[in-house]
Image (spheres, rainbow, N blue to C red):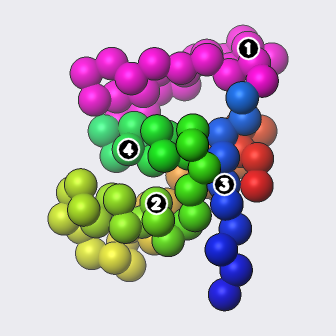
Amino acid sequence: MTLELFRLRTEDLHWREIDGEVIALEARGSRYIASNPAGAVLWQELAEGATRTGLAESLVGAFGIAPDRALDDVDAFLADLTARGLIES
């Protein structure tokens, strides 16, 4: 099992946490991105660098969801951010 570390791109990506949600500006494409509270938990951890498993554990701890559902949510979130070019791995 690989412990790949995922991290948000730092160049041309500006964000703030506001009232439990994340609002971001991706400056290369002039796109605004917003997340819900679960996405904000993941986003903040990705800013420092996190593994898939660590991200899922954070969702389980924060929201009390099942580990399998947390992994599915993490995979979907990572896929979306990767497709937008926002993840470095």
Which residue of the protein is positioned furthest toward the bottom in this rendering?
1
Residue 88 located left or right of residue 70: right
* Disc number lying in front (1 or 2): 2
Say what amino acid the circle numbered 2 marks: Leu
User: What is the CA distance from the residue labelled 4 to the residue labelled 3?
Assistant: 14 Å
Residue sitting at x 37%, y 67%: 57
Look at 46% across and 38% down and name the residue there. 44
Read off the residue under disc 2.
55
Q: Amino acid at mark 4?
A: Val
CA separation in Å, label 2 and label 3: 10 Å
The answer to whether mark 4 and mark 3 are in CB contact below 8 A is: no
The residue that label 4 is drawn on is 41
For mark 2, give the secondary structure: helix
Q: Does 34 appear in magenta?
A: yes
Query: Callout 1, which amino acid?
Result: Ala
Residue 79 against residue 34 in the figure, above or below = below
Q: Main secondary structure of the magenta part?
A: strand
> Mark 1 Cα within 10 Å, few/some/many (few <14, many 20+)?
few
Quadrant hosting residue 19: top left
How much space separates mark 4 and mark 2, taking CA atoms?
8 Å
Relative to residue 35, is residue 1 depicted above or below?
below
Q: The magenta stretch spans which residues?
A: 11-36
Q: Position of residue 16 (x, y in %)?
A: 46, 19
Q: Earlier in the sequence, mark 1 or mark 3?
A: 3
Q: Which mark is on residue 6?
A: 3
